[in-house]
Every structure is written in C-alpha cells, then in structure tokens.
C-alpha cells in the first residue's frame, strides 16, 4: 500500500458596509467562499490475485455565496449594554 495525502485550499471573502442610522444598526453584506480538494491517485496490489482498489487523481472544487443583512439595537441596562445581533441571509 502506498501512503497518500489529501491537499485542501480554501478562501473566504466578505464585504460589509454599515451606514449610520440613529434608531438601529443595519449592516448589509456579501460573502463568497471556495474550497478545493486535490486527491492523489491510489493503487493497491493483491498478492493472491484477488480484489485490489485503484483510482486516479481528482481535483474537486466547491463554492458558495451569501447575501445578507445584519441588524442590531442596543439597550442600556443597569451595569451593561445589551445588544442582540440577528443576521438575515440568503445563501447559495
């Protein structure tokens, strides 16, 4: 049996813009990501002439994108500031 290694490369890009609003924070954003897997060729040899596994090298790329809006509103508490964040997004 021959040792093999899987190689992976991944990249994530995100862009946000937050305009000023006096009543609530609104942040629209767009994001994209891709991941590539490089799988090497693999082969086994059977000593008795029975079944042995074998396949060729392959490269697979998966991508996704996302558009969304993040909103937040802060409230003054006794000893802190409370800010719940709720993202709303559409991904593909």
Image (spheres, rainbow, N blue to C red):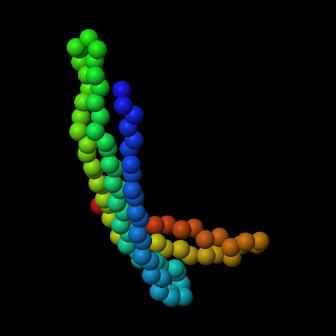
Please tell me which residue lies in front, 19 or 65: 65
Q: Position of residue 61 (x, y in %)?
A: 29, 54
Q: Residue at x 31, y 59 (%)?
A: 63
Position of the N terminus, as image quadrant, is: top left
Position of the C terminus, as image quadrant, is: bottom left
Q: Position of residue 9 (x, y in %)?
A: 39, 56
- Residue 41 in view here: yes
Q: Position of residue 31 (x, y in %)?
A: 38, 69
User: Toward which corner of the image does residue 58 lie, by quadrant?
Assistant: top left
Q: Residue at x 56, y 76 (%)?
A: 73
- Residue 91 in view here: no
Please tell me which residue lies in front, 20 or 51: 51
Q: Position of residue 84 (x, y in %)?
A: 57, 67
Q: Residue at x 39, y 34 (%)?
A: 3
Please tell me which residue lies in front, 71 or 31: 31
In this view, 87 is above or below 25: above
In this view, 66 is above or below 54: below
Please tell me which residue lies in front, 49 or 31: 49
Q: Is residue 19 left or right of residue 53?
A: right
In this view, 14 is above or below 4: below
């Amino acid at each position: 049996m021959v040792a093999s290694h899987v190689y992976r490369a991944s990249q994530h890009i995100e862009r946000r813009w937050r305009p000023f609003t006096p009543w609530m924070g609104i942040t629209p954003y767009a994001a994209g990501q891709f991941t590539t897997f490089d799988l090497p060729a693999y082969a086994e040899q059977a000593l008795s002439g029975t079944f042995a596994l074998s396949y060729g090298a392959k490269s697979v790329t998966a991508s996704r994108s996302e558009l969304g809006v993040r909103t937040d509103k802060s409230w003054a508490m006794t000893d802190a500031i409370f800010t719940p964040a709720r993202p709303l997004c559409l991904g593909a």
